[in-house]
Amino acid sequence: MDWAISISVAALLLGTGLSGQHPAGERELVGAVLLAAGGLALVARRRAPIALLAVTGLCAVGYEAAGFEVLAVSYLIAVYGAVRAGHRALTVAASVSLLVVLPLTALVFRDGPAREAFAQARNVLEIAWLIAAFAAGEALRQAERRADEAERTREETARRRADEERLHIARELHDSLTHQISIIKVQSEVAVHVARRRGEQVPETLLAIQTAGREATRELRATLEALRGDDTTPLQSLEHVPELVERARSMGLDATLTVEGQRHTVPAAVGRTAYRIVQEALTNTARHACATTAAVRIEYRPDALSIQVDDDGKATPDDVPTPALGLLGMRERVTALGGRLRAQPRTEHGFTVQAHLPVERAS
C-alpha cells in the first residue's frame, strides 16, 4: 500500500508539473527529479515521519525554485503522517518555516513583481490544504488514542471480573471442601493415634488416608492462596514428583521414578502441569486400574519435557478410555501449553499416559 501511494503521488506530481508551464533544459530535468523524489519518499511515511517531512519540504522548495508550480501533495501527506504520529509541534514549526521559505525562493529565482512570486508560492503550498492535512492527522490520532483507551478499559474490566470470579471460587471451595477435608484428616489421625496407643498394627489403608488427608489439606490451602492472588506459597512442581511416587508406594503400588536427560530449569507452568499429570495418572492407577506396578519416566530434552506413566492394570487394547474429568483436565493443561497428550491402553495390558510439553513455547 505504501509503495502504491508513493508511486501514484509521484506520477500525479510529474503529470501535473510537466503538463503545465515549466522550464526547459537542465531546470526541467532537476524539477522532474525533485517531483518524483518527493512522491517516492512517501514509502517511508510510517517508519520515519519526521525525516519524510523534511525531505518532501526540501523537494517542494527545490522544484519551486526550478520553476514548477505544483501543489506540494507529498508534503501534505507527510504533514498528515507526522501529526498522526504525535509530532504536532514539530510539524507546525516545519510548516511555518516552509510557508516563509517558499515566497523567498520565488522572489530569488523568479523574475517579475513580488505579487506574482507570492502567488506562485501559494500555488505550491496553500494554507487551506495544509490546515486540512493537519486536522485530518490530528482527528485520526485522537480516534486511535480513544480506541486504545477503550481497549485498555476492556482489558482492565476483564481482569477485574476474573479476579472477582477467582475470589468467588476460592470462597466456594473454602466453604464446601475445607470442613469435610478437615474432618477426614482429624478422624484419620485420631484413629492412627488410638491404634498406636493400644499397641495395634495400623492398617496401611488408614495410613494412606491420613497421608492423603494431610496432602489434600496442603494442596487446598495452596490452591486457595493462588486463587486469592497470594504467591508466597509455592505450588507443586517437578521437584515434588518423588513425593507422589512415595505416596503411591504407601498405597500398595510398586512405583518407580526414572529421570533421563540433562536436567534444566523449565517454566513454572510446565513444571506444574507435569506434576498434575503424574499425580492424576498415579491416582487413577491406584483407584481404578487394579495394578501392582507403576513406572514414572521424566525425560528432559533441550526444547521439551516428556512425561510417561505406565501401569500393569486390567486395561486391554480393546478398552475405550472413558473421558473422565481427570483425563479431560490433563488434556486441557497440556493443550494450553501447546503440547500433546496420549492416554490409552498399552499393547498387552495396562494403561499409559504420555505427555510432550514444549519448553520454549511455554516460556
Image (tube, rainbow, N blue to C red):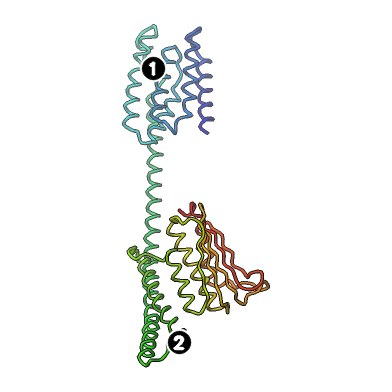
| Above-or-below relation of 248 to 20 | below
Nearest the eye: 199 or 337: 199
Q: Is residue 358 left or right of residue 121?
A: right
Mark 2 neighbour class, 10 Å CA radius: few under 14, some 14 to 19, many 20 or more: few
State which tag comes first along the sequence, 1 or 2: 1
Image mark for residue 64:
none
| Distance in Å between CA atoms under marks 1 and 2 | 102 Å
Instruction: Check disc 2 and give the amino acid type.
Output: Pro
Instruction: Check disc 1 and give the amino acid type.
Output: Ala
Mark 1, secondary structure of its residue: helix
At horizontal 47% and vertical 63% (from top left) the residue drawn is 273
| Picture mark count | 2
Residue 27: x %, y % from top left: 47, 9
Image mark for residue 121:
1
Q: Are marks 1 and 2 in contact (CB under 8 Å)?
A: no
At horizontal 46% and vertical 73% (from top left) the residue drawn is 246
Mark 1 neighbour class, 10 Å CA radius: few under 14, some 14 to 19, many 20 or more: many
Nearest the eye: 202 or 277: 202
Nearest the eye: 315 or 194: 194
At horizontal 38% and vertical 24% (from top left) the residue drawn is 54
Q: Which residue is mark 2?
A: 203
